[in-house]
Image: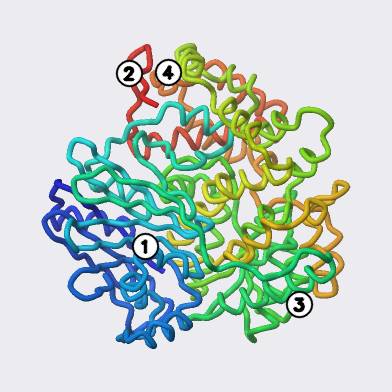
Amino acid sequence: MCRIFGYLGYDFVDAKRLKAVSDLQFKGGPDQQSVLSERNWAIGNNRLSIVGLDGGGQPYVGGEHIRIVFNGEIYNHHVLRQKLELKGYSFADTCDGSILPALYAEYGTEFVRYLDGMFAIAIIDLRETVTLTLVTDPSGMKSLYYYWDELKQSLYFSSELPSLLAFERIPKQLWLSGVDFYLTTKVIFGERTMFDGVYALPPASLLHARLGERPRLQRWSTYVTSDIPTTNFEETAAHLRKQLGEEVNFLLLADVPVSTVNSGGLDSSLITALASSSTEGIHSFNLSYVGDWPLDEKAYAREVAQRFGTTHHEVLMDPRNFQQLLPSVVAHLGQPNADPITLSSYALFEAIHQAGFKVTISGDGADEMFGGYDRFAEAVHTLGDWVKPYIGSLGVADAQQRWELYSDDYRSFVQENGSIEDHIEHSLRQSNRGRLDTILSFEREYRLPSYHLRRVDHLSMAHSVEVRVPYCQPRILDLANRLPDSWRVEGGRVKKLLYHTSEGLLPASILTRKKQPFTLPIDAMMRKGLPLFAAIEQALDRETIRRQNVFDPKAIDKLLQRQATTPNGKTALTLWSLAIFQLWLDQFQVSISSSKQYQFEG
């Protein structure tokens, strides 16, 4: 596991600037830092040593022409190494990434189709015209951001946004449509980021840049697929349990101890059970809050830990410290994410690091693979139009409330350029797939990598912890794409196949309890007189908001007054989201057009 960065182009980036880029990702790779550079290119790496501790030095070198940096894990590297050795290749160490130059030399850009794992990879090929190739895994588990400077004909990339901005060639300009996007969906989906001109490489993507030419983005498909049949429900459930067990076994392979996240829900409980069945001495981690708050799951997590004999860590987070954590969380994410779970995640990964673990396995992605959210069931069983209610379930505020929050000028801007809600609605209605397949495809392609996996990636690596995600592995993704609707959602019941897969293994209390999110109960915590309310109120400075001219200060004052007198979850989430946005603007000193009529390029 590492952090990577670099550039290709006619702009020369000196060693001091490259070090500044590297330093901003240091916690994601504290064990080794390295940079390789020439006049028109550079690639660098911050390494978190997980596999092959004595080797694995990056950049990896393949002959005179190939230079590679790599972030992630390749779980089938032993099999690939054996095949390459039969073709005459040799390797200096057993680190998973050391096979990449040979694999690329043998198959070209097709090499990525053989990889089973999570990864973001950058390849410099010095044959003929210098080229840079960037690659991401099928689920988007490892983030990679980039910026193309048309004037300098230069491409810059990095694993994290703050690091990318440290190249100092990237303008910190707000993407104005991103504000409407953020409140509509809680985070920016897809390739765009909140910084204008800065992009995120989508899942299963390859960005190919030749020196002096504009980069080209293409998609790729993996050779790593599932052979589980989907003709008989009982047989598929049995095969799925076996396949998940094999995936967890892969993810347990490391030269450092591996732990699990055990929230007390179905997904993480199943992973903890499978890990404990495979390896003795598993440590599991659960996070809860000091005091008596709603949505507390520690009793369920404790029951799972007792049943499977894990060494269980109950991490207690004090709500009085939330306001102190907010700036760090916003800084590490690099752009706004409106889910309060970000604070919980940050504290949980810090505790895992402090307990001495570099690796943990989580249950993220199961809901998107197997149909686990109530909004899926509601959309499937809605009579009449399902698209607008589904989109409404994703956001911070509904269309009417967003309209009331915007300033007059920002309303005009949205009217002229179109709302994000209209764009998503058009995309969903254009699908020729069934209702549930349309939703799950949208969630896996856009929401899962942007909303969940980037949060997990950035906040874990902020504490030098690698998170492995079995439900997002390519074989599980392939199987999930082939399931009948009734095996996922039926009669209001969600995640039907995964529940059946877990029967006889997990405690009945886990299988019968009502699903609840691993999140922060901000409705209860954001009350007048409590520290979190004061922090939110301070972040929403009236004069600053008036000067920015994106939101209406009077509308925000009304929200604050409503939460102070008649608090509720919707109001609390809206205030939280607005405060996170304001903290992000301040942290990164983001520029907003000062003209009354916003200027915009699509």
N-terminal label among 2 and 3: 3
Are the residues at dot 2 and dot 3 in contact (C-beta closer than 8 Å)?
A: no
CA gap, disc 1 and disc 4: 46 Å
**Picture coordinates of residue 442 (x, y %)?**
61, 43
The amino acid type, in three-letter code, at marker 1 is Thr
Rendered image quadrant of residue 91: bottom left
Mark 1 sits on what residue?
109
- Which mark, by number, is residue 306? 3
| The image quarter in which residue 287 lies | bottom right
Q: Are marks 1 and 4 in contact (CB under 8 Å)?
A: no
The residue indicated by pointer 2 is 594
Relative to 594, 256 lies left or right: right
Q: Position of residue 318 (x, y in %)?
A: 59, 54
Residue in the image at 85% along x and 50% along y:
490
Picture coordinates of residue 245 (x, y %)?
67, 76
Question: How far is disc 2 from disc 3 in space, using C-alphas?
Answer: 59 Å
234 relative to 538, above or below? below
The Cα–Cα distance between marks 1 and 3, rounded to whole angstroms, is: 47 Å
